[in-house]
Amino acid sequence: MSQAIQPGGAPGVAAVPEAQPAPKQRGRFVKFMIRLVRERPLGAVGGLICVLLLLTGIFADVIAPEGYNAINPIDRLQPPSATYWFGTDQLGRDVFARIVHGARLSIIVAFAATTLSIVISALIGILSGYAGGRTDLTVQRFVDGWMCFPDLIILIVAVSVLGPGTWQVILVLGLLFGVAGSRIVRGAVLAAKENVYVHAARAIGASTPRILWYHILPNVIPPIIVLYTTRLAAVILAESGLSFLGLGIPPPAPSWGGMLSMDGRSYMFQAPWLAIIPGLALTVAVFGINMFGDALRDLLDPRMRGGGGRYVARVRKRAGGK
Amino acid sequence: MASVQAETTAAEATAAPAPLLRVRGLKTVFRQEHGEVNAVNGVNFDVRPGETVAIVGESGSGKSITAMSILRLIPSPPGEIVDGEIEFAGRDLLSLSEEEIRLVRGNEIAMIFQEPMSSLNPVLTIGQQLAEPLIVHKRVQGKKAIRERCLELLRQVRIPDPERRLDCYPHEFSGGMRQRAMIAMGLACEPRLIIADEPTTALDVTVQAQILELLKELTRTRGTSMILITHDLGVVARYADRINVMYAGRIVERGTAQEIFNSPKHPYTIGLMESMPRLNQPAGTRLKPIPGQPPDLSKLPRGCAFSPRCRFATERCRQETPELTQLSAEHWKACWVDIDEAV
Amino acid sequence: MMFYFLRRLLALIPTLLIASVIAFCVVRLVPGDVLDLMLSQNAHSSGTIEDRAQLEKALGLDRPLYVQYFEWLGNVLRGDFGSSLWRNIPVLEEVATRLPVTLELGVLALLLALLIGVPTGIYSAIRQETLGDHIGRSFSILALAIPNFWLGTLVVILPAIWWGWSPPNQIQPFFEAPIANLQVFFVPALILGASLSAVIMRMTRTMMLEVLRQDYIRTAWAKGLKERVIVLRHGLRNALIPVVTLVGIMVPILFSGTVIIEQIFRLPGMGQLLLEAVVNRDYPVITGIFLITGLLVMLVNLLVDLCYGYLDPKVRYDS
């Protein structure tokens, strides 16, 4: 549960709009993948986890055709075995099937809420950042006020108003992270605004939409990509936290957080796998997304790895010299 | 390493005073993602007691790195000293342990840096920073004595109202005053050698002259040697006894100030002289820049590093790297071409 | 320094107003629920239209929204946050009984997180790219991925199964029995602080790296100072200034965390009160808690700003 900390606004990377033919684009993608594996192996592992998560979610019906709510009281509270890979819960439902369908739920909510939040962040950030002056000040005061409230508390209050449910959760998460993330977009816009070519474009009378599209937006896209990946993980954690408290997506939906909720607590003492497995799934998913996102950011943001801070030169004489 | 021997015997032959600092074959590299940069690529020079030696060159020539290598102030990772000897007071600085070189720094050899604003810690007072070398190298004991010594140092560098200034923070000083404070820090332990890395580049022109005069006075009166690093030839002309011209990590010419200015023998030095605007030129004279770009230090060409830009370059220049050869008592050049004949 | 303080205080006012509007709107946007709930609670009334209108009038819910807002604001400024619908006690009073638990949990968690995060961050920075650095960073990434409610649940469940141990639950007042008190709070605070420490570690590491790259660090090496002195005296004092502001950002996260941790460990704090109020649709309590946490966060931010102003000589001695 975190208002994800961004270590400062990412500097705008001046991107020249590329006009490359399609085959070359594919080559760039492959090269990027190779760089990823070679320089950031952990990030590549993270990427693999993300792919696995996506596939599980998409093919949930194929992997676990019986669905997430196949109640079977005969086999309740069975430990993990050959038949039930992750055991069963207090209603006899196969935990593995619930996890698999939970993956689908997680990615749907994650993508929907994150996309919504990015749209909101972009709208607020670009408008506020580009307009500047009074508008910017007022909007920023509003954002400041908003940021004073702890995110979970906003979520709880909002859900108490709207009631539990999937679309409510998506809406509320999107709004919350949207406002919080607008700061970062605004930072990137402010940096981009200072570029000489923006001044030049304005001087020749280019219209605002044109400037926004051709000059500001390309600079804002890299930090937005990074923001997207961090938000995905944050959204998954937030939704699971809400469901844990019973305020998120209501049962019998297989929300991983909901599977850990206090209602099932008494059963967990008898069947500890019920406590371990959903949390493990969450951890792996969030870990994978974060690692991949970190690696992405490192590769997209070419900052020189500066000196290690130890100003004591290593002296290692080579025979023969160069 | 024929030239090293040649230099050594030549120096002994002319019976010059034993040098305070002897640098031989210094090589420092930096490992970057795209390759290895040979920042310092085989540098030899001496500094004698009481003299001011200049190292002149463009940005990227390796002059600052050379200076920092003397005190081993190279950040490792990426940097590493891969060859050479640096003899100072009978010891090879490159073979000292971390603790031993630490005791040399600020004590027997002091360094003054280019950017006085960023080179001073913003959260400590000038007095606190001035006292540090005194305390660490145990030159003075006791709070009162330390304060006295700090005040004295501030007076020596001509900072007005030193009583009050001692408790000020760096951001309350002007650029010139900060540089004076840095000089005071350098002098605190009365070093035998001061290395001044572009001490005036970041300052206003009017202040530059004051700082340089101050340095000259302080070093002359104490007999302190100084290595002056700069890209500004005008500075060098007035304040240096001998000059080393560096290009692409190597010294390409060395001589007294007279020799370098009046009869430069290396095409690069000649180019530098020609590209300087002078007051006695007729108005409307065009500047003569050196054509081309400085080389990429991770991909040095074969042979002389300057040959791609040199109008006298021969085939030999492009194949073999020239070593420093002696022309007279103090005048050396690293070039295959005899300028007087070629012109 | 005085100007800085006053400026900060003044800047707070619009934020406060906007926060109050947000708090007010969030809850008032509920259509008729409160009334239905209250009416259904009354044994005899089944909610005829007149009864409903009467109730609405009595609660003042029939007047225009902005009038309601100003009246509500006036009350708040006098310290009247309304009364709990559930228990008919003033909201402020209820919160006051719960607040100490939440505060103690939060403060303890923050201290633990700083104690763990700052040294590991410094170590990671000065030994960059070594094994220690990589291990530290991997741990912190892991810590950020583990949901705190999962960790808390495991800590409650697994030791009970393995050793028959469960965390102590009876809270003793701190000043009377500090050890017993801390025994109750230690494990929850540790869990709450765990993910926080990862964030602090990463931030400290980034700041230290940034600081160690500065020219004045090079000057310190050139003077022959020892590494420990350079890192602590020159590096840390500069790096800690932004870390102080980090504490300000941490506080909302702490509040969020306490809601979950109190639930898991059954601690009677403000978070539990909020959850109860949500279940009971006790809107005055919900609004009250919402507003109070916002106020507390703003207060802490103000304090943090003051600390920052004190630590940074450029602000402290603005000539």
Image (tube, rainbow, N blue to C red):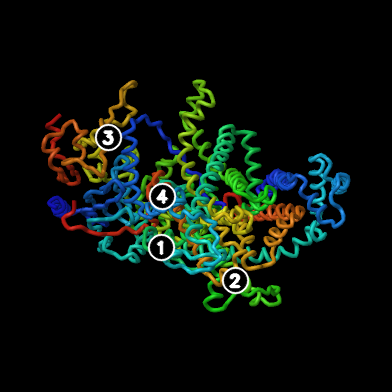
Q: Alpha carbon of mark 1 to alpha carbon of mark 2: how far? A: 26 Å
Q: Give the residue number, with chain letter if any, for mark 3.
A: B293
Callouts 1 and 2 on one subunit? yes
Give amino acid for label 3: Gln
User: Which quarter of the figure has residue C40?
Assistant: bottom right
Crowd tier of the residue under label 1, counting other residues whose Cα lies within 10 Å: few below 14, some 14–19, many 20 or above: few
State the image coordinates of residue B177 (x, y, percent, origin top left): 49, 47
Q: Give the residue number, with chain letter if any, for mark 4.
A: A51
Q: Give the residue number, with chain letter if any, for mark 2.
A: C186
Give amino acid for label 2: Phe
Q: Secondary structure at mark 2?
A: helix
Q: Alpha carbon of mark 4 to alpha carbon of mark 3: how far? A: 48 Å
Q: Residue at x 23, y 50 (%)?
A: B43
State the image coordinates of residue C132 (x, y, percent, origin top left): 39, 64
Disc number lying in front (1 or 3): 1
Q: Residue at x 23, y 36 (%)?
A: B268
Q: Alpha carbon of mark 2 to alpha carbon of mark 4: how far? A: 39 Å
Q: Alpha carbon of mark 1 to alpha carbon of mark 3: how far? A: 44 Å
- Of all chains, the one bearing label 4 is A
- Of all chains, the one bearing label 1 is C
Q: Give the residue number, with chain letter if any, for mark 1.
A: C135
